[in-house]
Image (cartoon, rainbow, N blue to C red):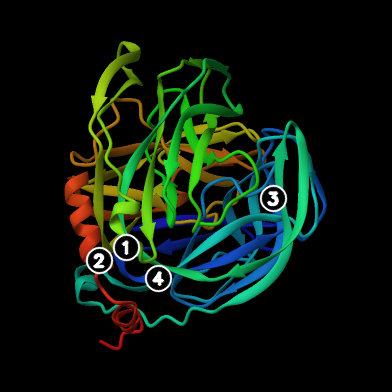
Amino acid sequence: MKVEMTYWVDEIGGKLERRELELKPFGYRMAPVTQWEMLIADEDITVEKGKPVILKVKPIYLPENTMVGPLSIMRHALGVVQDVVECGIPERVEDEKCINKVLFIPVESGEVKKDDLIGVLKVFYIRAGILNRIFGLNPPKVEIKREVTEANITWRDNGNVYRKRAKLDALGYTRSHIGVWEMLIADEDITVKKGDIVRVNIKEINLPPSTVVVPLSIMRNAYGTVLDVVELGRPKRVEDEKNLQQAIFLAVEDGKIEKGDLIGVISVYYVGLTEVESVIQEKSPERVRMIYRSGEGIIKKEVTVEPFGYKRSPVAKWEVLVADENKELRYGEPAVVKVKKVKVPPNTIVYPLHIMRHAYGTVVDIFCDCIPWRVEEGGVIQKVVFLPVMDGKIREGEMLGVLNFYNVEVGRLEKIRGWYSKWVKMSEKEFMAYVEGLQ
């Protein structure tokens, strides 16, 4: 497949260039460990609620055969990291990389200070190959590093922003590829307008220790998409128990969210070696109101959702999102852009390949103007939600982003508990030997 890539040669907003790429069907195998890297502000900057900014961070240098993603749960008092920007021309996953900027979305107005912790980056180690050969690939050898750095931890309380200097341990974690889905259910009525970025109170969700969360892609609410989730108060470690009380919601059109509406879904992954009884708790079916589009307009439907989870394959593939229309962009205003059709097979979840792939912004979600399909059913991607960082124009044929496609096996909690128990029974020594490719 031939696509056109747009990028800034020198700096964001500087000299724009385009080049044609020939893309082949590639996939990869992941190592079951992930490294953390701290995103620390390298400048003072005033931010305004709802106005995305490109913010300088202290450079992070990544080895070849790595890909990245933000660690969810808001880490700065004023906003969230939606994506990251490479130093210069975006490189291939197989190449060494440098990250020196982030796309930061302010949820509140205020001052970001140099040395503030803006977010945390997850670094995944992979071995890439032609699609029909990836099942024969061995996981890459991984050398997890340990670095201690200092930064300002920030949080809000009663409208005030607090900062505390802290030592941060940039470790890594073992990843089980096993998780459950948690529904984000609005716990208040709130009116939104297109482009609004708002905090929505949700029915509280308890997260067991040693879990990480990732918003499940493909819009679950007709009015917009969830960018991140929030635990009020001082940020906690992954190892700690947490309670989520809010979701950060980007409105793609005017509307009203009502108490009981489903606004999004998060995947909750188990990491580290923890007793299964302490993490996979019994849950009852939940009644929720789905809000979606159809030919008749906005439909509201009450449904009962059973508690489900999944086991994700360590083998995945990439699918490219290519614009199928020309589209004018306005800074900070989400645009729904047609893309060349991408089929999502049954039992597949999608996750963005982070690092901005278009000069003017990033894809924040898959737009759904139908009943959101279940993971077990699959569907077709025809539109995306694109968030511009400046005025500009998308041209037909340009690459907007890349998606990771993961095959999953879906099951009820009893089955999830069995999968997790088997995984935990692997000794730490055996597991690390596997990670290093020594078995």
Which mark is nearer the camera, 1 or 2?
Answer: 2
Q: Nearer the viewer, residue 405 or 173?
A: 173
Q: Nearer the viewer, residue 218 or 312?
A: 312
Disc 1 or 2, which lies upstream in sequence?
1
Judged by depth in the image, the label closer to the viewer, 3 or 1, is 1
**Does the CB distance between marks 1 and 2 fall below 8 Å?**
yes
Q: Is residue 426 above or below residue 186?
A: below
Cα separation, mark 4 vs mark 1, equals 9 Å
Task: Answer with the quarter of the image where residue 405 lies.
Answer: bottom left
Q: Amino acid at mark 3?
A: Ile
Read off the residue under disc 4. 33
Q: Amino acid at mark 1?
A: Ser
Q: Residue 56 at x, y = what percent?
A: 73, 58
Tell me the CA gap for discs 1 and 2: 7 Å
Mark 3 vs mark 4, CA separation in Å: 29 Å
**Residue underneath mark 3:** 54
Where is residue 302 shown, x and y percent of the image? Answer: 28, 16
Amino acid carrying mark 2 in the image: Trp
Residue marked by disc 1: 176
SS for tag 3? strand
Give the residue at mark 2.
423
> What residue is shown at x 67% (from left), y 47% (from top)?
76
Residue type at mark 4: give it.
Val
Circles 4 and 1 in contact, beta carbons < 8 Å: no
Q: Comparing marks 2 and 4, which lies closer to the viewer?
A: 2
Q: Is residue 409 visible?
A: no
Query: Marks 3/1: CA distance?
Result: 33 Å
